[in-house]
Image (tube, rainbow, N blue to C red):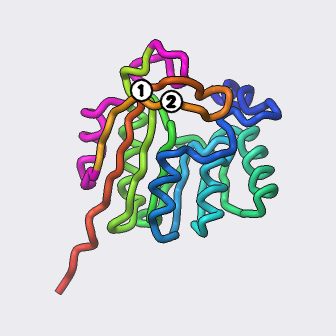
Amino acid sequence: MKEHWNERYQADTYAYGIAPNEFFAEKLEKLAPGFLLLPAEGEGRNAVFGAKLGWDVHAFDFSEKARIKAMALAKEEDVAFQYDIMSYEDFELPEQAYDVIGLVFTHMPPDLRKIFHLKLINALKPEGIILLEGFHKTQLGRSSGGPKTDALLFGEEELMEEFAALEIISLEVGTRELDEGPFHQGEARLIQMVAHAPAEEETD
């Protein structure tokens, strides 16, 4: 799997473009900057966008090639952020550390996804927000991007169950025309979620 992604990110062109994901960008720019986590950040398009808005960005991915290109993009855009080489399994998240976590096309096997999503909930500060966009299960068979296996795609029920500890502000499935580099092109079935951590409990 790691070899697959290193090969994808080997080219000079950016596999998913250099502009941020539209859903992520639209939501993030309405929030006051704080600490932002971006798992599976790839070539850095969303990290650069967040850093330019003043967010303290922490990104990770297991592809060395992706990090090289992310750092090159950051230098070109004159921003800086932390970017670690880690897998979902190995990345240990501090508790209550992040104001926003951006999950942009972070598809993984169900067992791993459940464990990782729980880690993310614990890593949110009180009133922190998770922004998620990914390919819905009805994307299967389309050529516009995403995993080719049903188990790796998102469904409403799974997300509602896995993020039950949060208040799900919105959870929507729809069709959108993707134009994100050579690997996300065309009409796609997407799921978008905004979820909010509860406020810190008051103590006497």
The verdict on residue 32 being magenta is no
Identified at 54% across, 16% down, the residue is 143
Horizontal side of 53 relative to 161 (left or right) equals right
Question: Local crowd at mark 1 within 10 Å, few (<14), some, or many (≥20)?
Answer: many
Q: Report the label total.
A: 2
Counting from the top left corner in percent of width and height, residue 45 is at 65, 47
Q: Amino acid at mark 1?
A: Arg
Question: Which of 118/199 is in front?
Answer: 199
Identified at 60% across, 45% down, the residue is 41
Could you say whether the residue bearing mark 2 is in a helix, strand or loop? strand
Identified at 81% across, 55% down, the residue is 76
Mark 2 and mark 1 residues within 8 Å of each other at the beta carbon: no
Horizontal side of 128 relative to 83 (left or right) equals left
Q: Which residues are magenta?
A: 141-169
Q: Residue furthest front?
A: 177
Counting from the top left corner in percent of width and height, residue 91 is at 54, 49
Counting from the top left corner in percent of width and height, residue 186 is at 55, 24
Can you tell which of label 2 and label 1 is closer to the viewer?
2
Q: Amino acid at mark 2?
A: Glu
Question: Which of 172/162 is in front?
Answer: 172
Instruction: State the image quarter where residue 52 is shown.
Output: bottom right
Which disc, if any, is residue 177? 2
Counting from the top left corner in percent of width and height, residue 73 is at 76, 50
Instruction: State the image quarter where residue 144 is shown.
Output: top right
